[in-house]
Image (cartoon, grey):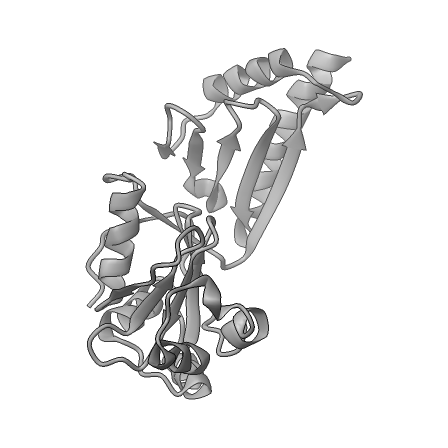
Amino acid sequence: MHSVPLYVIGQLQPVMKSQLEEWQAAGSVKFPADYTAFLLQYGLGSINELLMIDVPDPDYMALNFSDYLDFWELTETDKTELMKGLTVPTTIDGDILVLTNDDHTPFMLLPRHSGSIRRFPDFNTVIGDYINRYALGTDIYFDPYAGYAQEYISFIIDNKLDKKLFDKVHEALLANYRFDRTFNAAIQPKYILQSIGGWVYADAVGKSAIRVKYQQAFATEAAVVIDFIKSKIAALTS
């Protein structure tokens, strides 16, 4: 069973058992118990905008890497498994995770920046490896793709980045909203608002933008937050 605890943002849309069966049939690959449990509990989405859990793809490797498998140190057996496998999560850094029919280590990781493949016995171990590698600690969240929508608000005004404007709007946001949780607060804060099924992300390093992610079910509530940010920008630049 799935065992890594994840903080959930917004409303989940678990995968139906019938859909799981269809995905397995498409790749002729048996889903490990914990991977099945994850999809039935959480559905599709991302873990910390790092591990992107999407519809398993039986054609991804063949369409994109059939002529480039020499990127990695692979045996002929590895290559055969990859071509028959299902690409499951990919990562923001370009890693590829393929689910194969290997009985002991079904998950094969193809790193973006290394030729050495890695294999994992189950999906929990895959998640744990990324938690350790990126030092996520307990700040682990799941962001569902269900009803996903996003607003990008730029602080490039008249072709010039206005960092002071960003600071003022950022301060107003913090003064006027009480957030359910904050992730990565020391660098690039992501302020969780369960009332919109999403978050407000402040580019506190580059100070170039604020992103508001929400679920369509909460579009009215999200519009209030977006309008607040835009009205502050308008008031400070008029």
- The image shows residue 84 at horizontal and vertical percentages of 43, 83
Residue 228, compared with residue 74, is above or below; it is above
Q: Residue 222's image quarter?
A: top right
Residue under the image location 42 percent in, 42 percent down: 194
- The image shows residue 195 at horizontal and vertical percentages of 45, 41
- The image shows residue 200 at horizontal and vertical percentages of 50, 34
On screen, residue 37 versus residue 115, left or right, reads left
User: Is any part of residue 44 visible from this angle?
Assistant: no
* Count of marks, rendered view: 0
Q: Residue furthest right?
A: 158
Residue under the image location 56 percent in, 72 percent down: 67
Residue under the image location 34 percent in, 59 percent down: 116
User: Is any part of residue 146 visible from this angle?
Assistant: yes
Quadrant into which the C terminus falls:
top right
Residue 223, compared with residue 210, is above or below; it is below
Q: Residue 208's image quarter?
A: top right
Q: Nearest the camera: 108 or 36?
A: 108
Residue 64, compared with residue 59, is above or below; it is above
Quadrant into which the N terminus falls:
bottom left
Q: Nearest the camera: 215 or 81?
A: 81
On screen, residue 185 versus residue 200, left or right, reads left
On screen, residue 237 versus residue 81, left or right, reads right
Residue under the image location 61 percent in, 29 percent down: 209
- The image shows residue 129 at horizontal and vertical percentages of 26, 52
Residue 102, compared with residue 205, is above or below; it is below
